[in-house]
Image (spheres, rainbow, N blue to C red):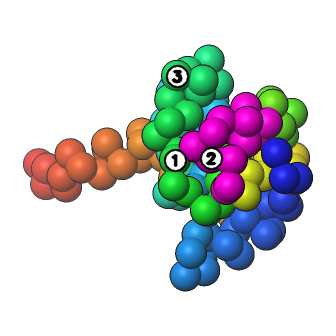
Amino acid sequence: MDGEISPAEVEELLHSDDPPRIVDIRQPASFSRGHIPGSENIPFNQLASKVASLEGAAHIVTVCPHGQASVQAARLIKSYEGTGDARVDSMEGGLTAWDGDLESEVEQAAADEGPDAPF
C-alpha cells in the first residue's frame, strides 16, 4: 500500500484525464444502494481470487464504509505481483467521509423501467 488519500483528492482525480480505478470492497447489496460513480465492486472476501482483474492499472483506490478494511485491501492488492507497480491507496474515512455524489443501482433500475403510465 502506498498510503491513504483524502476523499477530496479522489474526487479530483476522478475528473482528471487518467482517473484511478476505485475498488469498493463492500458486499454487493451495500454497493448497489450507493457507491462512488465509476467504482467497481469486489467484495473483500473475494479480493484475493479477483485481484488479477486489476492488473495493468496505474492507480487503484480502495473504499470501504469507514476507511479501515480498505487499508487491508490496499495492502493485499499491492502485494500481488501483477499490481506491484501500481499506486495503491486507501480512501481515508471511507464512504462516511465522501461528500461527492453517489450512484445507486436501485435508482438506475427504477429509471430503466420507463416513464410512469399517465393513467
Contact, mark 3 vs mark 1 (Cβ under 8 Å):
no
Mark 1: which secondary structure?
loop
| Magenta residue span | 74-86
**Which residue is denoted by mark 1 in the rendering?**
55
Q: Which comes sooner in the sequence, label 2 or label 3?
A: 3
Relative placement, left or right, of 1 versus 32 is right
Three-letter amino acid code of the residue under disc 3:
Ser
Q: Residue 42 placed where, x, y %?
A: 54, 33
Dot in front, 2 or 3: 2
Q: Nearer the viewer, residue 51 or 67?
A: 51
User: Measured along the vertical axis of the image, is residue 69 above or below residue 20?
Assistant: above
| Main secondary structure type of the part rendered in magenta | helix
Residue at the bottom extreme? 17
| Residue 97 in sight in this render | no
Give the Cα distance between marks 2 and 3: 14 Å
Task: Residue at 87% x, 46% y: name it.
Answer: 93
Q: Please name the residue that numbered disc 2 is placed on.
A: 83
Q: Quadrant of the N terminus?
A: top right
Mark 2 to mark 1: distance in Å? 5 Å
- Label 2–label 3 contact, CB within 8 A: no
Q: Which mark is residue 22?
A: none
Please name the residue shown 31% across and 42% down the image.
109
Q: Amino acid at mark 1?
A: Glu
Q: How far across and how far down the image is residue 47, in percent?
A: 59, 27
Which residue extends farthest top? 45
Q: Are marks 2 and 1 in contact (CB under 8 Å)?
A: yes
Residue 49 is labelled as: 3
**Residue 93 versus residue 115 in the image, above or below:** above
Residue 81 magenta-highlighted: yes
On the picture, is 22 further left or further right than 76?
Answer: left
Mark 2 and mark 1 lie on one chain; the one further toward the N terminus is 1
